[in-house]
Image (cartoon, rainbow, N blue to C red):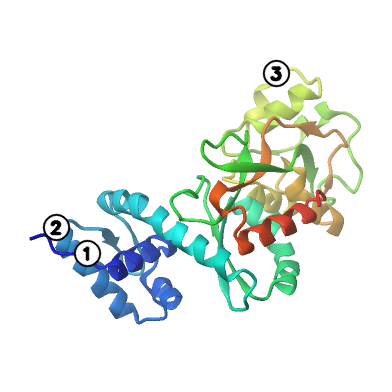
């Protein structure tokens, strides 16, 4: 006779997968970390496989654990969505997981979140950053904010922002005076993106022919780091205007030359279609669209 698997243990496992932490999962479930560990170990014993890869202070899903998570998490996500819809606007804390890139979180989203908290104190926001699209359909995030084409099969994507590439620098590096021609940027040290592509794109769009110097210079993993390098006077950087706007307004960087270049990729709000009407998701989508000037 096949023994039944505890739904409580599965729910605990899914929460560990979502949180990436036994401690945070315990806090979300209002139990002790020891109880969470015991539930997961019971599942591992039941299935005869290791579901988690445990480090000193972190845990992550094993390949078998990820497979189980992707199959089980959507069911619990649907239960949560049904409960949220049933409860409607009843008071009480609601956790909302938002996944985005490190640069977008640092430069655009985080400075604005206080306004969302003031409007919706009942919703507890958790920001997760990754360069990869979170498994929204698998329940690892409620909302994703992503830079790309907007084509995410099975998910609902809504255009948020259309960025432009701008060349920026510390005012001290340029003595407070913008350059006269785009080609003059090549006289200065250039700070490169991870793929060393943005300077080439910007220069070509501004009529500057191929140059070996265009791909030289230290490279940084994301625009937030590029902006910090520019603020420190290390060189000129090409970044997306949605990241640079706050620093331009503060005067910590300036436009090296006013010659923006439109990009093909844009920023989208990505959610699972079934979650569109969930109150916490709908509230966040409406708020962020207004922040982007679309509401």
The quadrant the N terminus occupies is bottom left
Decide: marks 2, 1 in contact (CB < 8 A)? no
Point out the frontmost of discs 2 and 1.
1
Residue 272 visible in rendering: no
Specify few, some or many for label 2: CA neighbours under 10 Å numbering under 14, 14-19, or 20 or more: few
Helix, strand or loop at mark 3: loop
Q: Viewer-proximal residue, 199 or 148?
A: 148
Dot 1 crowding, Cα within 10 Å, few <14, some 14–19, many 20+ = few
Spot occupied by residue 196 in the image (x, y as percentages of width and height): 60, 33
- Where does label 2 land, which residue? 48
Tell me how far mark 2 sits from mark 1, CA to CA.
13 Å
- Mark 2 or 3: in front is 2
Location of residue 250 by image quarter: bottom right
Name the disc covering residue 210, or none: 3
Q: Which residue is mark 1?
A: 5
How far apart are the alpha carbons under marks 1 and 3? 63 Å
Asked if residue 174 lies left or right of residue 220, the reply is right
Q: Is residue 246 left or right of residue 69?
A: right
């Amino acid at each position: 006779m096949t023994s039944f698997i505890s739904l409580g243990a599965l729910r605990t496992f899914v929460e560990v997968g979502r949180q990436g932490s036994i401690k945070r999962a315990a806090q979300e479930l209002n139990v002790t970390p020891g109880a969470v560990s015991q539930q997961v170990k019971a599942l591992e014993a039941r299935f005869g496989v290791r579901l988690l890869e445990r480090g000193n202070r972190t845990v992550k899903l094993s390949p078998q654990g990820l497979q189980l998570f992707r199959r089980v998490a959507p069911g619990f996500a649907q239960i949560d969505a049904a409960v949220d819809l049933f409860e409607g606007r009843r008071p009480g804390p609601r956790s909302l997981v938002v996944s985005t890139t490190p640069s977008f979180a640092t430069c655009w989203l985080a400075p604005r979140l206080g306004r969302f908290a003031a409007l919706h104190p009942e919703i507890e926001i958790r920001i997760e950053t990754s360069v990869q699209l979170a498994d929204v359909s698998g329940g690892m995030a409620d909302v994703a904010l992503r830079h790309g084409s907007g084509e995410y099969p099975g998910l609902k994507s809504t255009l948020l922002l259309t960025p432009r590439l701008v060349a920026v620098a510390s005012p001290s590096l340029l003595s407070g005076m913008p350059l006269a021609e785009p080609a003059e940027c090549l006289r200065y040290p250039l700070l490169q993106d991870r793929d060393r592509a943005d300077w080439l794109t910007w220069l070509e769009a501004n009529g500057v022919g191929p140059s070996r110097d265009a791909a030289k210079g230290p490279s940084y993993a994301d625009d937030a780091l590029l902006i910090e390098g520019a603020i420190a006077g290390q060189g000129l950087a090409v970044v997306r205007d949605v990241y640079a706007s706050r620093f331009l307004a503060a005067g910590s960087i300036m436009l090296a030359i006013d010659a923006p270049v439109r990009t093909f990729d844009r920023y989208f709000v990505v959610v699972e279609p079934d979650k569109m009407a969930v109150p916490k998701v709908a509230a966040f989508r409406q708020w962020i669209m207004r922040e982007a000037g679309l509401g």
